[in-house]
Image (cartoon, grey):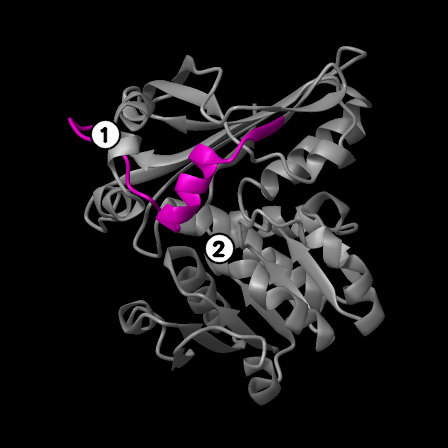
Amino acid sequence: MARILVLGCGLVGGWVATTLANDGHDVVAVDTSAAALANLDPRVTRIEGPASAALADEHVPDVVLNTLPGRLGHGVRPGLLERGLMVADLAFTAEDPADLDALARRHGAALLWDVGVAPGLSNLLLAEGARRHGRLRTGRVRVGGNPVEPDDGWSYMAPFSPYDVIEEYTRPARIVRGGRTVEVPALSERVPFEVEGRGTMEAFLTDGLRSVLHTVPADELIEATVRWPGHIDRYLAEHETLNEDDLVAAWAWRDDRPEFTWMEVVCEGEAGGRSRWVLDDVGREDGSSMARTTGAVTCAAVDHLLSGDVVPGIHAPERAGEGFLDRCLQRYAAHGIDLREA
């Protein structure tokens, strides 16, 4: 078994730390929140304090997990790479970690980034669609984690850093149109549609394609976040009068409220072939749906790094080498996560 250093123990990071401890790994977890650390499996070694690359000098990990909020996640990357470490990186940063590729190679380090459900598994499925069908006419991702039932308020709880949700809502969305990458405003092109077994929801463009803008050949690629109708109308009407802390409080997570994560990935090839995958998962005793669906991919990234199949450098999920998608599917099966090809 390996020693794993986990930087950040929110809903997802905490789930990953506990799951890896259950697998028999020696897990050390770091967070500034004593409450977050208290939720971990007792076998996890807990450090209350700020995350830093220097912690690796003391704990000598085989793999480091960067599950910090996007605003903090990039800051630890150079130090981890300079130490020649293997890193599974989930931080939703505005900075592109690929810019650190030369640094990683120079020090023999490897970093897999965006190792979540979307981006992450969505990248792998889009790449699988391109493998099957060649250049895509259309590739589309729709994804969201939401309460099972809407309400009279926001109809939403943030399953990961609420500040990262705000980033999704404000960062321009990069998509592919006519074979070219273009920027459009976030939250644009809102589309109502039916989610099987859930009802009418709303999809809107967000900046979740990231690396596949350059790695999946396509005439059109889009990624859209899914929410209950009315959520974005309220955000657009009120966000200028609410500061970020107001929104974080309004979107606070509630363990007692049923929630689900749903994702659809559709690939249509120029020659006519078509593939469609649907993910539908609900929260269970072992974790929220977003923690499970995201964290299982992060755990698969740890498996992949420990396999020895990853060469030094910075790697997007779809460029992580043979076997990564299979490892993700194995983790999903082990946790009873419903991903089906429809």
Where 107 sits versus 309, above or below? below
Q: Which residues are magenta?
A: 150-174
Point out the tag, 1 or 2, that comes first from the N-terminus: 2
In the rendered structure, the answer to whether residue 87 lies left or right of residue 313 reads left
Q: Are marks 1 and 2 in contact (CB under 8 Å)?
A: no
Q: Nearer the viewer, residue 42 or 95?
A: 95
10 Å neighbourhood of mark 2: few (<14), some, or many (≥20)?
A: some
Which image quarter is the C terminus in? top right
Q: Residue at x 78, y 51 (%)?
A: 321
Residue 34 place in picture, x, y as percent: 29, 74
Question: Element type at marker 1?
Answer: loop
The answer to whether residue 16 is left or right of residue 173 is left
Residue 28 in magenta stretch: no
91, above or below 3, in the image: above
Residue reaching furthest to the left? 152
Task: From the image, tell me which residue sits under label 2.
Answer: 71
Is 171 magenta? The answer is yes
Query: Which residue is identified by label 1?
Result: 149
The picture places residue 232, in percent across and down from the top left corner, at 33, 24
* Residue 293 image point, x, y percent: 47, 46
Amino acid type indicated by mark 1: Glu
Q: Of the residues tagged 1 and 2, which is closer to the observer?
A: 2
In the picture, the quarter occupied by the N terminus is bottom right
User: Splitting the image into 4 quarters, where does residue 157 fall?
Assistant: top left
Question: At numbered mark 2, what does the secondary structure look like: helix, strand or loop?
Answer: helix
